[in-house]
Amino acid sequence: MTGQPPAPLVPAEVDLRGYEFMPLYGDRLFKSETWIGASPAAKEAMLKLWWHGYAKEVPAGSLPNDDTFLADYAGYGVAVRLWLKVKAQALRGWVLCGDGRLYHPFVTELAMEAWEFKKAQRDRTEAARKARLSQSLSQDQLHGLSQGQLHSLSHSQLQGPQDRTGQDRDRTENLKTGKALSGNPDVTPPNGRDYRAESREVLDYLNRATGRAYRSVDSNLKLITARLKSGVTAVRMKEVVLHKSDQWKGDQKMDEFLRPATLFNATKFEQYLGEIGEPTAD
C-alpha cells in the first residue's frame, strides 16, 4: 500500500513575494551531490526554480506540479520538451506534498528563516506604533488595551497632552466678547468652532508621530483647516496620520510624503480616509 504524501514543509501563510534576496550558502550548495551531478543546463534551471519558489510563490519554497509552468519558470518558456530533458536533475530534492505542490527542504529552510525575520520586523513596527501612541495615553490607559482597542481609540485619547479645559474656557470667553481665538474671522466661524486651534492640534500630532517639526504657518495649516471644514474630525485626521506613518515611515521612497501637502491634499486624503475604514463606535 502506497504511503500518503507528506504534509507541506512550510505553513500556507509563508509569503516572501517582493523579497529581492535569497542566501545560497555556497559550500552547502556547490559541494552537494545534486549540484555536482547536474549538467550546466540543469544547474541554471535549478537555480531559477529555487529563486522562483522562494520569492514568487505562496507558500514560499514551493512550486506548482505542472510542467507548463515549471518550463517557464526554469527559463524554457513554452519549450516544454526541452524542459523535460533537464527536469529530473533540475528538480532533484523537490518533494510532492499533500497539497499537490512541490517543496524543497533546503529552499523551505531558507524561506522560514526569512519569514521569521519578517515577522520579527513586523512586531518591531507594531511596538514602535504603540510607543508613539503612548505619548498621548497614560500608562493606566494603555494597560490591558487589546490590538483592536488601540485601533479604535476614543476622541479624548487621541487629543494629546493639552489643557483642553483651559482652551475651551478661553474660547468661550472670546466668543462672549466677540473675539476670535485666532484673530482671523475666516478661521473662527459664527458657530464658534476654532478651526485654527484644531488644525494646530493635528499638525502637532503629525510632528509627534513622524519626528518632524512642521511649523504652524498658513501653508501647513490651510489644508488641515479645509478638511476640518469639510466635516472630518480632528480624531479621524490623526488616525490617517498614524495609518500612513505606519506604512511609510522609514521607507526610502515614501517617507518624504509624510507631510501636510501630501497627507491633507483633498483628493489624496479621501483615499487615505477610505483605507482606514469607518470609525469604531465607542
Image (tube, rainbow, N blue to C red):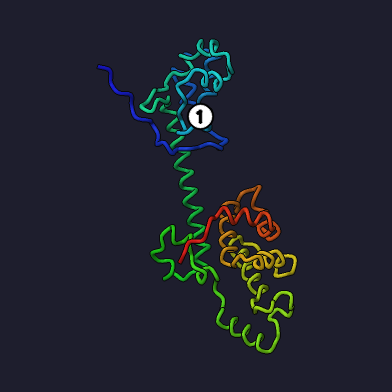
Front-most of residues 27 and 176? 176
Residue 133 x %, y %: 51, 64
Secondary structure of residue under mark 1? loop
Q: Which three-letter amino acid code belongs to the residue tagged 1?
A: Leu
| Front position in the image: 108 or 265 | 265
**At 54% from the left edge and 74% from the top edge, which residue is drawn?**
161
On screen, residue 27 versus residue 144, left or right, reads right
Residue 88 at x, y percent in the picture: 45, 14
Q: Residue at x 61, y 62 (%)?
A: 211
Against 262, is 1 above or below? above
Vertical side of 175 occupied by 256: above or below: above
Number of disc labels:
1
Name the quarter where the C terminus is drawn: bottom left
Q: How many residues crowd around disc 1 within 10 Å: few (fewer than 14), some, or many (20 or more)?
A: some
Horizontal side of residue 185 vs 83, given as left or right: right
Q: Residue furthest front?
A: 190
Position in image of residue 12 (x %, y %):
41, 36
Residue at x 49% of width, y 17% of height: 67
From the image, which quarter does the N terminus lie in? top left
In the image, residue 61 lies at what x, y percent? 46, 30
Which residue is labeled 1 in the image? 24
Specify the farthest residue to the left: 1
- Towards the viewer: 158 or 85: 158
